[in-house]
Amino acid sequence: MGNIRILTLKFRNQLRPDEIKWFRGAVIHASDKDNVLFHNHTEENYRYAYPLIQYKLIHRCAAILCVEEGVEAIGHFFSGYTDRVRIGERELRLEIDYLRPAVFSLETTECPVRYRLRRWLPLNRENYQTYRTLERGDQRIHFLQKILVGNILSCLKGLNIYSDEKITCRIQKITRMYTIPNKNINLLAFDLIFTANLSLPPYIGLGKNASINCGIVTLAHKD
C-alpha cells in the first residue's frame, strides 16, 4: 500500500486526559500559529481532513504524534521552543523523554492483527439514534464494526494511501463504555479489542477527536 513518515515526541510530564486541550494550546502558542496543521482551523471554518499533528497521552505522559507533513511542521514548535508552559492553572516545565522518527509501512496482512482501541468516539447524533434502536448485542457490534472500517478508510485517505484489497475489522471485546465531555455534551466512548487485516502505526488516532487523545490504536497482547 505505502509508507508514511511518523515522528513521536513524548514528554516525561504526566497529564490528565482533560488537560490535553491545554497542552494542545500551549504547543500552538509556541509554534507557527499560521500553520493549520497545529490547530485544524482555517479563516473560513475548519480543516476537516485527517489530523497530521495529534496531541495525546502515552503511558499517561504528554505526547505529540506527527504524520507526513506534520513531521516538517513540528520544526516550528522547536524553533520557538520554551520548556515553560501553562496547563490550565499551573505552570509546567516540559521535559522531553524521547523524539523518535520512523517510516511505517502500511500494508494489508494475511493474518489479522490484534489491536487495542481506547477513547474511541464512533457515534454522532444521527448514528447514536440508530445505535440505540439496535436491541441485540451482535447487531450493535456489527454496526460499530462498519463505523470502525470507515474510520480506518478515512485515515488512509487522509494519508493518501489506497488499498486494492478490502479492509476488514472484527471487534472481539468491548472492555469499557463511558462518556467523554465534548463541547458541552457527553459523547459515548469505547475501549475495545479488535482485529484488522492491516498494519496500523502505534498510537495513531481514528475517528472523532483523533487529534486530541481519542481513538488511540496500539497493539493488543494476547490475554
Image (spheres, rainbow, N blue to C red):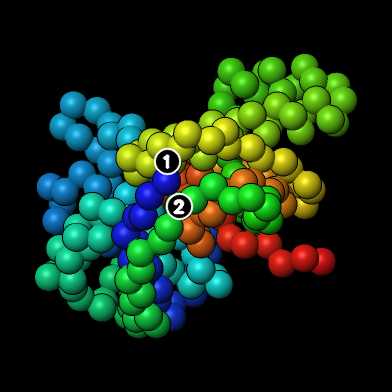
Residue situated in front as seen by the camera: 176 or 113? 113
At horizontal 33% and vertical 32% (from top left) the residue drawn is 48
**Rendered image: mark on residue 32:** none
Local SS, label 1 = helix
Residue situated in front as seen by the camera: 17 or 51? 51
Residue picked out by circle 1:
156
At horizontal 76% and vertical 33% (from top left) the residue drawn is 141
The reply, left or right, for residue 56 in relation to residue 145 is left
Residue situated in front as seen by the camera: 123 or 2? 2
From the viewer's perspective, is the residue at label 1 or at label 2 nearer? 2
* Three-letter code, disc 1: Leu
Q: Picture coordinates of residue 219 (x, y %)? A: 62, 62
Classify 10 Å Cα crowding around label 2: few (below 14), some (14-19), many (20 and above): some
* Three-letter code, disc 2: Leu
Residue picked out by circle 2:
106
Local SS, label 2 = strand
Residue situated in front as seen by the camera: 194 or 90? 194
Q: Give yes or no for contact between labels 1 and 2 (Cβ–Cβ under 8 Å).
A: yes
